[in-house]
Amino acid sequence: MKKLILFLSLFFLLNPGFAQLSPRQQYPGLFEAVQLSGVYADNKTFADAIPKENPAAIMQDYRAQKAKPNFSLKAFVAAHFTEPASGSSNFKSDINASIREHINTLWQVLYRRHDTVSKSSLLLLPHDFIVPGGRFRETYYWDTYFTMLGLQESHKTQLIRNMIDNFAYLLNRYGHIPNGTRTYYLSRSQPPFFSMMLDILAKDEGDQVYTRYQPALLKEYAYFMQGANRLSAGKAYKSAVKLPDGTVLNRYWDDSDQPREESYKEDVESGKLTKQDLSIYYRNIRAAAASGWDFSSRWFDASQKLSSIQTTAIIPVDLNCLLYHLENTIARSYSLQGNKIRQNFYLLKAAQRKKAILKFCWNEQAGWFLDYNFQKKKQSPVETLAGVFPLEFQIATQNQAVLVAKKLKNTFLKSGGLVTTNNRTGQQWDAPNAWAPLQYIAINGLTKYHQNDLAKLIVERWIETNIRVFKATGKLMEKYNVLDTQLKAGGGEYPLQDGFGWTNGVLLNLMNRYQGK
């Protein structure tokens, strides 16, 4: 493994521009033409396509041919690019198999071998990995944590370690873990679950995991805290926001203010409906993608329309809970080394963040944790399942947890599980949809505050939903409709996927914990 990482490091050192340009940067003009023309139904296809020759030669050929009377863009693309293969396109489910058997089969279906040479937008990794679903050929950041929950239940410790090593490599190579392992994702990250992944591995390998990956933890923290020390009150730089009282919290961010390459046509079309400056609009779209919640009314104004998206104005409660865990994990790594000074430094950072989350995100009247709009200097009125994160990380008081549990039961719990929000916008992170990661965080959080009956009720409904849909379709879905459990979940920018990594992981974890192995 060390030899491979050394090889990759030397390769990139000697070839600094290799594979770092995104498809739009490599094929200016051609890329936009293909994405807007509908050559492929899914914009991600061309973003992932493999060139048959040097990009410069392709562009020279394109410039020479495009003005000719009989020029066919579709034929040109077919002649110069190979469509990316889907690893699980031929997979057929056995609905007579048990759920556990199905999930164990899916680990093989979703398994991808790492490439040693990349001619496409794919980022090179030192180890093999699991992808979320059949559409994907690359690994994704926050999906992986919940997938690992299932891999742990399947005793695949080596694969977990390899995937963590992949992320540590990305942190060392790029200074952050990208949204996914594609060049066009390098401008943003995703919810920072890396420190949580170490908790999974530490259960099998012990506390030395925290010291082994301390450099990676510090790089992740540095990425999210860029510029924080230079901020004045009320100002923001990238992910860091300094509030009027001097506290630093964080927001989601993307370094680019252009349409997303993997959803180029969708972004250009939706951009025609906004009143915002397009660079601001596209950055807000991208920041929502960095949140993992793309898209949701939590990022919109009162109109509940995508055109009003304001992600970069919002301090998300879930992001800051994850960074609280990261700070505590770094402190733990220093404690294991006997470094009290650095341990106390990060414990203080965590304590300050906890105090700020309670101050800016807790709403006593609502009995809920809300996002905070730092530009408007007030809480967001949108109640979402992100409000359960302070329970998972034990930031909430016992009284707050009781109020959160009450609202969960009365407002969010539906026949099929916990709905993401109660707003019907047509967006996939709103009603009527439910997602495995949020069920898991809510269930875990409730148990930490002794709300065990409600946790068990959510588990029962969620497992029943998963099994019922599997028996009807042969699939474990990315998301579920929990209001009308006879209907499929909708919204989003691509068809429902075979898989689905995080659904598999959470389901297997909950079944083993609550129903026995």
Image: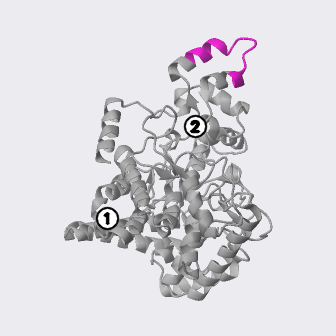
Residue count near mark 2 (Cα–Cα under 10 Å), binned few <14, some 14–19, many ≥20 = many
Q: Which residue is mark 1?
A: 209
Q: Position of residue 437 (x, y in %)?
A: 57, 66
Q: Quadrant of residue 104?
A: bottom right
Residue 387 in view? no
Q: Earlier in the sequence, mark 2 or mark 1?
A: 2
The foreground one among 268 and 51 is: 51
> In the shown orientation, is residue 208 left or right of residue 490?
left
- Tell me which residue sits at (56%, 20%) in the image: 58
Q: Which residue is mark 2?
A: 48
* Residue 47 painted magenta: no
* Element under disc 1: helix
The foreground one among 127 and 267 is: 127
Mark 2 and mark 1: Cα distance apart in space: 34 Å
Amino acid type for the residue under numbered disc 1? Val
* Element under disc 2: loop
Q: Quadrant of residue 479?
A: bottom right
Q: Position of residue 133 (x, y in %)?
A: 61, 53
The foreground one among 396 and 17 is: 17
Amino acid type for the residue under numbered disc 2? Asp
- Tell me which residue sits at (80%, 68%) in the image: 486
| Image quarter hosting the C terminus | bottom right
Q: Position of residue 153 (x, y in %)?
A: 49, 70
